[in-house]
């Protein structure tokens, strides 16, 4: 499952970030394996999605969220 597949309200744990130009940037923003994130909402047309990471909110394009492997926590 990828972060892109998550639904609003789901809590997910990051397993892996696929190799990409954005991998280091995502990790700098707190998206590291083992971190829990919550899907907060998605824009009216579905892109971008808003997620809660630690103590802040982050917006990600669906194309970028597709590179983050996750598993559902609850």
Image (tube, helix red, strand yellow):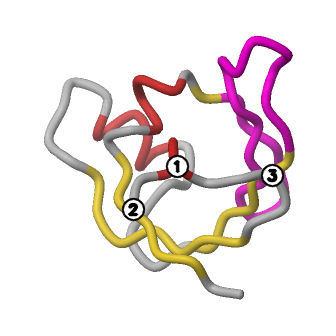
Question: From what the image shows, is residue 61 above or below residue 45?
Answer: below
Please give the label number shown on residue 8.
3
Asked if the magenta segment contains residue 52, the reply would be yes
Q: Residue at x 71, y 72 (%)?
A: 11
Q: Residue furthest top?
A: 45
- Picture coordinates of residue 35 (x, y %)? 55, 73
Residue position marked by numbered label 1 in the rendering: 5
In three-dimensional space, the C-alpha distance between marks 2 and 1, rounded to whole angstroms, equals: 6 Å
Residue position marked by numbered label 2 in the rendering: 1
Q: Residues within 10 Å of mark 3 (few under 14, many from 20)?
A: some
Circles 3 and 1: CB atoms closer than 8 Å? no
Question: From what the image shows, is residue 7 above or below residue 65?
Answer: below
Asked if the magenta segment contains residue 9, the reply would be no
- In this picture, residue 3 sits left or right of residue 33: right
- Picture coordinates of residue 51 (x, y %)? 74, 46
Circles 3 and 2: CB atoms closer than 8 Å? no
Circles 2 and 1: CB atoms closer than 8 Å? yes
- Residue 22: quadrant of the picture: top left
Q: Residues within 10 Å of mark 2 (few under 14, many from 20)?
A: few
**Which residue is at the front of the view, 30 or 65?**
65
Question: From what the image shows, is residue 2 above or below residue 63?
Answer: below
In three-dimensional space, the C-alpha distance between marks 3 and 1, rounded to whole angstroms, equals: 10 Å
Q: Residue at x 50, y 51 (%)?
A: 3
Q: Residues within 10 Å of mark 1 (few under 14, many from 20)?
A: few
- Residue 61: quadrant of the picture: top right
What's the magenta region? 41-59
Q: Residue furthest left?
A: 19
């Amino acid at each position: 499952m990828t972060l892109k597949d998550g639904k609003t309200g789901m809590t997910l744990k990051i397993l892996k970030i696929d190799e990409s130009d954005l991998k280091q940037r995502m990790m700098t923003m707190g998206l590291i394996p083992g971190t829990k994130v919550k899907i907060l909402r998605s824009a009216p047309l579905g892109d971008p999605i808003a997620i809660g990471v630690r103590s802040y909110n982050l917006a990600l394009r669906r194309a970028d969220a597709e590179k983050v492997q996750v598993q559902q926590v609850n």
